[in-house]
Image: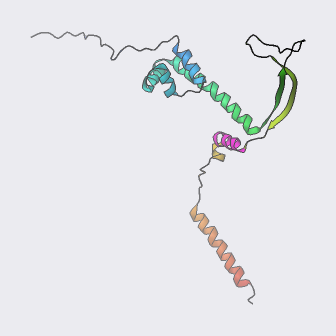
């Protein structure tokens, strides 16, 4: 009989080594998520599956933090834009009117690109207002005050109580009808 070796050989990791780059991938992930990319789109940019991207999030906390931070930044911008649209805002619109420029001899002035140079002859500034948008307001309220503004409100009805109140109303109506003088 041969004696079994009490020491086991160390297990080798399964699969090929990860392509994950600790130095660059968190920065790239933050930038991609700031552009509004979904996890699926980010995985595609890295050339990996969404499953691999999720594994990276679990294995590399810095990567997960970068993704979340990038998404929070773009979400904040969208939230601010929605709020601005919901409340309405004012802005200044500037229109510039151009005409071709001529030198002192009456010849057109030609730029380095070979095109005739144009100069501003006048600017018009107009104050404009974008009115509050009720759709944006409803969207905001449905998401921020869900209990009050949810679209599929839950009605809680105590049918026994309602039945009793309806019966009382009918009884009172009957009394009024019987008490009324007949014609």
**The quarter of the displayed image where residue 10 is located:** top left
Q: Residue at x 70, y 82 (%)?
A: 177
Residue 31 horizontal/vertical position (percent): 59, 19
Q: Among all residues in the image, which is located at the extreme bottom?
A: 183
The residue closer to the viewer here, 85 or 173, is 85
Q: Residue at x 49, y 28 (%)?
A: 40
**Residue 141 painted magenta:** yes
**The quarter of the displayed image where residue 86 is located:** top right
Left or right? Give the position of 20 relative to 121: left
Q: Is residue 121 above or below residue 135?
A: above
Residue 139 horizontal/vertical position (percent): 66, 42
**The quarter of the displayed image where residue 91 is located:** top right
Left or right? Give the position of 68 relative to 138: left
Q: Among all residues in the image, which is located at the extreme left?
A: 1
Left or right? Give the position of 135 relative to 34: right
Q: Among all residues in the image, which is located at the extreme right?
A: 104
Residue 81 horizontal/vertical position (percent): 70, 32
Query: Which quadrant would the N terminus be assigned to in this image?
Result: top left
Residue 117 horizontal/vertical position (percent): 80, 16
**Residue 4 painted magenta:** no
Coloring basis for residues? rainbow
Magenta stretch, overall SS: helix
Q: Residue at x 60, y 23 (%)?
A: 34
Q: How many labels sit on residues?
A: 0
Left or right? Give the position of 119 relative to 178: right
The residue closer to the viewer here, 151 or 95, is 95
Q: Residue at x 51, y 15 (%)?
A: 25
Q: Which residues are magenta?
A: 134-144
Q: Is residue 6 above or below residue 123?
A: above
The residue closer to the viewer here, 168 or 98, is 98
Query: Which quadrant would the C terminus be assigned to in this image?
Result: bottom right
């Amino acid at each position: 009989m041969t004696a079994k070796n009490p020491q086991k050989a160390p297990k080798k990791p399964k699969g090929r080594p990860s392509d994950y780059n600790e130095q660059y991938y968190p920065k790239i992930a933050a930038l991609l998520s700031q552009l509004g990319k979904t996890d699926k789109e980010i995985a595609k940019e890295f050339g990996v599956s969404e499953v691999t991207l999720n594994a990276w999030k679990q294995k590399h906390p810095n990567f997960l933090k970068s993704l979340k931070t990038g998404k929070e930044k773009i979400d904040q911008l969208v939230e601010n834009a929605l709020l601005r649209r919901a409340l309405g805002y004012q802005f200044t619109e500037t229109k510039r009117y151009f005409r071709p420029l001529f030198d002192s001899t009456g010849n057109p002035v030609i730029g380095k690109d070979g095109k005739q140079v144009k100069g501003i002859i006048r600017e018009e500034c107009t104050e404009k207002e974008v009115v509050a948008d009720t759709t944006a307001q409803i969207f905001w309220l449905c998401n921020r005050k869900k209990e009050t503004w949810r679209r599929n409100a839950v009605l809680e009805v105590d049918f026994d109580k309602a039945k009793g109140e309806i019966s009382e109303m009918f009884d009172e109506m009957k009394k009024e009808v019987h008490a009324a003088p007949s014609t």
